[in-house]
Amino acid sequence: MSRLHYLPFALQQSLEHRSLLKVISGLNNFDPTSVKMVSKAAGDAGADLLDVACSPDLVRLAKEASGLPVCASAVEPELFPQAIDAGASMIEIGNFDSFYSKGYLFSAKQVLELTLQTRKLLPDVVLSVTVPHVLSLDQQAQLASDLVDAGADLIQTEGGTSARTFSPGNLGMVEKAVPTLAAASTISRNLIREGKNIPLICASGLSATTIPMAFSVGAYGVGVGSVVNRLSDELAMLAAVKRLREAILESKNLTSQAYTN
């Protein structure tokens, strides 16, 4: 039986329906006030999953403020058990965006080793692993396949921090999303070709404009961070998450109409 069956039923359903919305407070965001605001907005606006830094206190705070399942993210496997004990429904290695500005890059070998260490520590816990966007697309596809073999239950893409935007408005938003969309498309096709049809989460650099594109290239869900957590008050965060949820619903409605017609 897949470890995904250990997830809360509503979360399983959102993956099955390919409509998952994950709100990310930030891998290096340990500010309780900020995490609480993001958590409450995510819960009130209809997100499916909340992603917080791997701290037992933050996991408990996020669960209470949001009422949502919580994913604890880190790049240090030894931190994960305490987060699970605090109530996290799943764990994630990555994403790595916050490290790039500090000059630290994660290699395929390092990510694979982190995955093996984590799976050894927590063999029965649902594990998502981010594929570093600094790798070429072919390397990303190969790493994703290797990560599945190593025990990853979900694969996540990234790329927003490296995207170069040259245009205002919707065109700029598309330019921002190009790296993670390209990765999602490449990884999804390769996993399907290899018969490894596990959920793929497209994250980093997405907006309400580009979320439908993520689902069109094979994503089961989307992860959004800065478009929410960079805002300064809860009402603005609430409005942002609602727009993201509406974008997913509109995407699904358009897909249904296309098949119906």
Image (cartoon, rainbow, N blue to C red):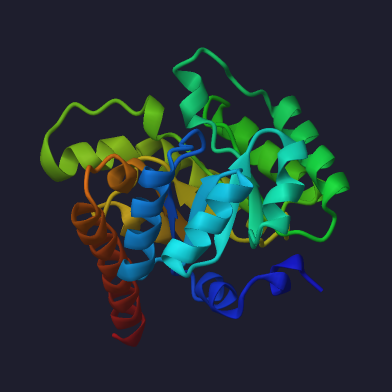
Image quadrant holding the N terminus, namely bottom right
Residue 53: image x %, image y %?
Answer: 54, 42
The residue lying furthest to the right in this view is: 120
Image quadrant holding the C terminus, namely bottom left
The residue lying furthest to the top in this view is: 103
Q: Residue at x 40, y 66 (%)?
A: 47
In this view of the protein, can residue 219 be seen by the observer?
no
Eyeballing the image, is 77 above or below 155? above
Residue 26: image x %, image y %?
Answer: 45, 40
Q: How many marks?
A: 0
Q: Residue at x 67, y 57 (%)?
A: 86
**Front residue (pair 59, 171):** 59
Q: Is residue 177 left or right of residue 9?
A: left
Q: Is residue 181 left or right of residue 149?
A: left
Res. 198 image quadrant: bottom right
Residue 169: image x %, image y %?
Answer: 12, 41
The residue lying furthest to the left in this view is: 168
In this view of the protein, can residue 260 be seen by the observer?
yes
Res. 194 image quadrant: bottom right
Q: Residue at x 63, y 24 (%)?
A: 106
Q: Is residue 196 left or right of residue 165?
A: right
Eyeballing the image, is 237 above or below 172? below
Res. 254 image quadrant: bottom left
Eyeballing the image, is 50 above or below 113? below
Residue 59: image x %, image y %?
Answer: 57, 53
Q: Residue at x 52, y 43 (%)?
A: 157
